[in-house]
Image (spheres, helix red, strand yellow):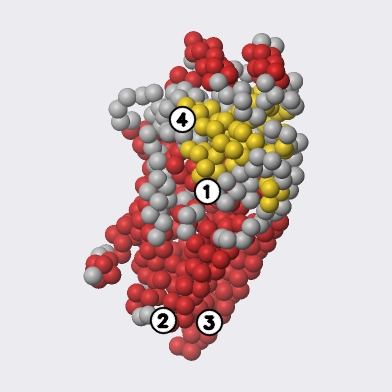
Amino acid sequence: MLINFFSSLDKKYVAIISGILLTLSFSPFDLYYLAFISIALLKNTLNNLNAKQAMIVGFLFGLSLFGSGVSWVYVSMILGKQGFALMPFIMTLLFCSFWALFPAIFGYFYAKYRAENIFDILFFSSLWLCLEYIRGEWVLNGFPWLQLAYSQLDTPFSGYIPVFGVYGTSFIVAINSALLATLVNKAKRLNVLWIIFSLVLGLGLSHIKWVEPAGNYFKATLIQGNIAQKDKWLLENKNKTMQQYYTDTVKHWDSELIVWPETSIPAYYHEVKDSYLVSLQQGAIDNNADIVTSLPYKNENDELFNSVLLLGQKTGIYSKVHLLPFGEYLPWKPISSYLLGLLDISLGKFSSGKAEQVLLTGAGYPFVTSICYEDAFGQLSIDQVKEARFLVNLTNDGWFDGSIEPYQHMQIARMRALESGRYLLRATNTGVTVIVSETGEIIAQAPVRERTSITGMVIPMKGLTPYAVAGDKQVLWLIALLFVFLLSYNKFSFLCVTIKKI
């Protein structure tokens, strides 16, 4: 009955519904099975369309997906304002429309060069993955939101994540979705067997222990300050905010590691290094603890960095490498500057930290540090994971309070723990603050939009998952080569058919 319902609808409406279904497969909805239904519906919708029609259907799918899934950018643009704002709405529509171009391109190329049988399944999946990678890593410094693998963190398909990473797992999900699409018209035994086999294999892989403990567990506390973003940088709130974090930290001197959120100190390093930071450092030393905090840092060349500061038995600093476009730097100047001026939004002009930085050490173990948006990039998290024993992420999703973004971001962060085989300590300003095990399981989670803290025991891990050894490149090269082969094969087949007709 459901199949007949979708078959009776105009393909443009099916594309729109499919995009919404895919959004619902991610957090906070977590209806993971809808990812397969969504992509299967999209594939069947693209059947029998010419390239132009398929491009329109792909665009509508993308506009629906990003319109329902990432329109929270609107929330960040009206922060502190009251009521509906037209210009931020238009900018959000343009933002979602830009990313919708990728499914549009997908629809065009798939319709133009589609093949038959298993070649069709592989071409569909490899084309999807190639465009997902370009969107996630290259364009505008990468926008890896709403990638298929993230919807499968709590399913048997999660077993593929420490082996192939987010892109390899997305490829497997795309293949199974495409196979599911073929079952709508006629059940094929081999397709059913492959879907069952991939589920069983994924379940089997999820039981393999890729890493092992590297020492005794330690106690860690994550502080969630819940400082409203619109109030955070007001001069009159500066001392109050710093005192709040100090007070909340003193309550947990029995923890060996205490982590604060991104830019939890609303002041430049040079403004507080001889006062506030001195007392904080002394307190950590006296109580045999380490504190990971964050603040903007300006060097002798007046370059500004979004930084993490380690205080305690050892000190150190990490500066953010992968900056957020339109948040920490402006691409497409001067057009972007003009548009943000219309929105009355002023952004930080940060510089990027060095690609290779010395690992910080907390509770006696080195750890990989990431700041906010950096946890969306798997390769960045594993570049130094061989020497690291756990991961630490400091985030401020206060820009998106009341939206679904913090839950999506937390889901993305969990992927990094599972890929690397390391515990993840993720401290956020307003939520979602979590401690995640090396298997991606949430051990402790703070309620959102509350001033609170969570404490848990962390096991330092050693050893490498297959993904941590190989990274993204090996998997992506194989998929890219497969795509090129299939594209060449499809073009050759199309030429032969054309010659026959002549």
Residue nearer the viewer, 407 or 320: 407
| Circles 3, 2 touching at the beta carbon (< 8 Å) | no
Earlier sequence position, callout 3 versus callout 1: 1
Q: Position of residue 431 (x, y in %)?
A: 46, 34
Earlier sequence position, callout 2 versus callout 4: 2
Say if residue 316 shows up in the picture.
yes
Q: Quadrant of residue 159?
A: bottom right
Query: From the viewer's perspective, is residue 212 above or below residue 203?
Result: above
Earlier sequence position, callout 3 versus callout 4: 4
Q: Which mark is residue 188?
A: 2
Q: Which mark's residue is nearer the viewer, 3 or 1?
A: 1
Residue linked to disc 3: 493
Residue linked to disc 1: 441
Earlier sequence position, callout 1 versus callout 4: 4
Earlier sequence position, callout 3 versus callout 2: 2
Q: Which mark's residue is nearer the viewer, 3 or 2?
A: 2
Residue found 42% across the figure and 47% down from its top: 27
Earlier sequence position, callout 1 versus callout 2: 2
Residue found 37% across the figure and 63% down from its top: 37
Q: Amino acid at mark 1?
A: Glu
Q: Position of residue 348 (x, y in %)?
A: 57, 26
| Circles 3, 4 touching at the beta carbon (< 8 Å) | no
